[in-house]
Each structure stands twice: as C-alpha cells, then as structure tokens.
Image (cartoon, rainbow, N blue to C red):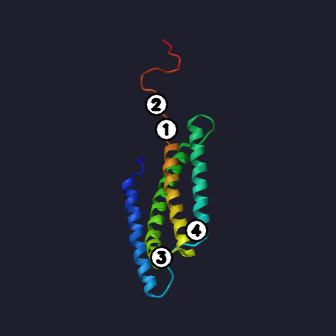
Amino acid sequence: MAKLKLRWLLWCAGLGAVAGWIALRLLTAAGRYAPVLDYSALYSLGAVCAVILFLGIRVKRSTLGKSDFEPIAAARTLVLAQASAYAGAVIAGWHVPAIITLWAATGITPTLTRGLVLAGAGVLMVIIGYIVQQLCKLPPEDTDGNSDSVVTE
C-alpha cells in the first residue's frame, strides 16, 4: 500500500481551504455566520483519533508477536488511518479562511477560538494518521537465507 504523501495532503488542505473560502463568502454575503464547525465535531474527531490510535497499537503489538490480529484488519486499520489523515487535512484547510477573516475583522472571538481548535484537531488527525501508518509497517523479512527451521536431507 502506498504511503501518505505530503503533496496530496497539502492538495486536500488546499481543496478544503478553497471550499471553506467559497462557503465563507456565500454565507457572509447572505448575513449568516462563518462556516466553523461546532465543538460537537471536536468530540467526534477526538473519538476517531482515539479509535485509530488504539487499532494502530493493536497492529503493532501483533507484528511484535504479543497479540493476534487478522491481516485484513491490519490493512483496514492502515486505510482508516490514511483516510483520517486526508479528512484532517480537509478539515484544517476548511477552517483556515474563516480563521484569517475572523482574526482580521474582529480579533479574538469565540468563533475564532473554535475555528483554531478545530483546525488543530484536523492537524492532529493528520499526525495520528502518520503515526498509525508507521505502526502498521511490517518488519523486514529475513532474506539472507538464514532460518530457524530444521533442514532435513
């Protein structure tokens, strides 16, 4: 499976920022609030991060021989970690235009603080995605021909 690439994460963050900027312009033109997620989204993001980290630790323990874990479940954990990293990049990017606009227009406000916290949660999702990707690495195989098996002739 391919590793997370910083370039794709930056593209996702940029896409989220463009979408956030368009939503910000449309909503503020209509007299609505800035499109910043509520704190309830923070609880959801935290739960997702905790579950992914827990699963990544289980995969690592399995590769060390300390527990039993299905290989397909390990692959699913890796995919989930990568998906959360991309989602975190989009979430962080989504909040950047609102953060910049709110900071320039009104200074420190509760909405700006919420946007900063949720953008930080998006960055945390990216970091946890990278960490779990490293936890899901398989140990290198023994390719030098030495094995512990008994050879019978």
* Between discs 4 and 1, the one toward the N terminus: 4
Judging depth in this view, the residue of 146 and 130 nearest the camera is: 130
Judging depth in this view, the residue of 140 and 129 nearest the camera is: 129
Q: Residues within 10 Å of mark 3 (few under 14, many from 20)?
A: some
Measure the C-alpha gap from mark 4 to mark 1: 33 Å
Which residue shows up at 53% across the image and 20% down it?
A: 149
Q: Which residue lies under the disc numbered 3?
A: 102
Q: Do the residues labelled 1 and 2 touch (CB within 8 Å)?
A: yes
Give, as a three-letter code, the residue at label 4: Ala
**Mark 4 against mark 1, which lies toward the viewer?**
4
Give, as a three-letter code, the residue at label 2: Glu
Q: Which residue lies under the disc numbered 4?
A: 41
Q: Which residue lies under the disc numbered 2?
A: 141
Element type at marker 3?
helix
Q: Residues within 10 Å of mark 1 (few under 14, many from 20)?
A: few
* Between discs 3 and 1, the one toward the N terminus: 3
Q: How crowded is mark 2: few (under 14 residues within 10 Å), some or many (20 or more)?
A: few
* Between discs 2 and 4, the one toward the N terminus: 4
Measure the C-alpha gap from mark 3 to mark 2: 53 Å
Q: Which residue lies under the disc numbered 1?
A: 138
Judging depth in this view, the residue of 66 and 94 nearest the camera is: 94
Q: Do the residues labelled 4 and 1 touch (CB within 8 Å)?
A: no
Measure the C-alpha gap from mark 1 to mark 2: 8 Å
Measure the C-alpha gap from mark 4 to mark 3: 20 Å
Which residue shows up at 57% across the image and 53% down it?
A: 52
